[in-house]
Image (tube, grey):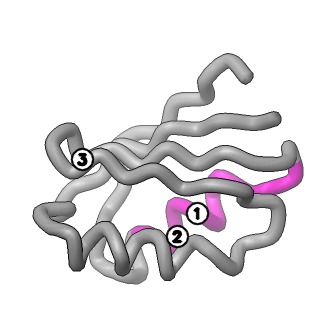
């Protein structure tokens, strides 16, 4: 299982969380998306075939620019 944390900006409320989850749910290989509003982090877990760049591009496209990406131990 692959786990990657994306540090983003602009997540402020439950509506933002829904927008992030909805934007990422159809990306192949993702099994879960956990959004931390307080720390402005998005933790993505799933099969090793999901693309960090695709997630970064998707998040930026829906209004949440990514400032850093950190791969976590599975």
Distance from disc 3 to disc 1, alpha carbons, whole Å, reads: 15 Å
The image quarter in which residue 55 lies:
bottom right
Q: Measuring from the top left, give residue 63's x and y in whole percent.
A: 29, 77
Q: 51 above or below 4?
A: below
The residue at 73%/23% (across/down) is 74
The circle drawn on residue 57 is 2
> Quarter holding the N terminus?
top right
Outermost residue toward the top? 73
C-beta proximity under 8 Å, tags 1 and 2: yes
Which of these two is toward me, 67 or 73?
A: 73
Could you classify mark 2 by the number of other residues whose Cα lies within 10 Å: few (under 14), some (14-19), or many (20 or more)? some
Where does label 1 land, which residue?
Answer: 55
Q: Measuring from the top left, give residue 37's x and y in whole percent.
A: 21, 51
Where does label 3 land, which residue?
Answer: 40
The circle drawn on residue 14 is none
The residue segment tinted magenta is 49-59
Q: Please identify, in this view, whether the residue under mark 1 or under mark 2 is nearer the observer.
A: 1
């Amino acid at each position: 299982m692959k786990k990657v944390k994306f540090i983003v900006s602009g997540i402020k409320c439950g509506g933002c969380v829904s927008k992030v989850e909805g934007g990422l749910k159809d990306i192949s290989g993702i099994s879960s998306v956990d959004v931390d509003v307080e720390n402005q982090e998005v933790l993505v877990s799933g099969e090793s075939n999901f693309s960090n760049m695709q997630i970064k591009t998707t998040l930026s496209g829906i209004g949440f620019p990514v400032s850093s990406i950190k791969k976590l131990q599975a």
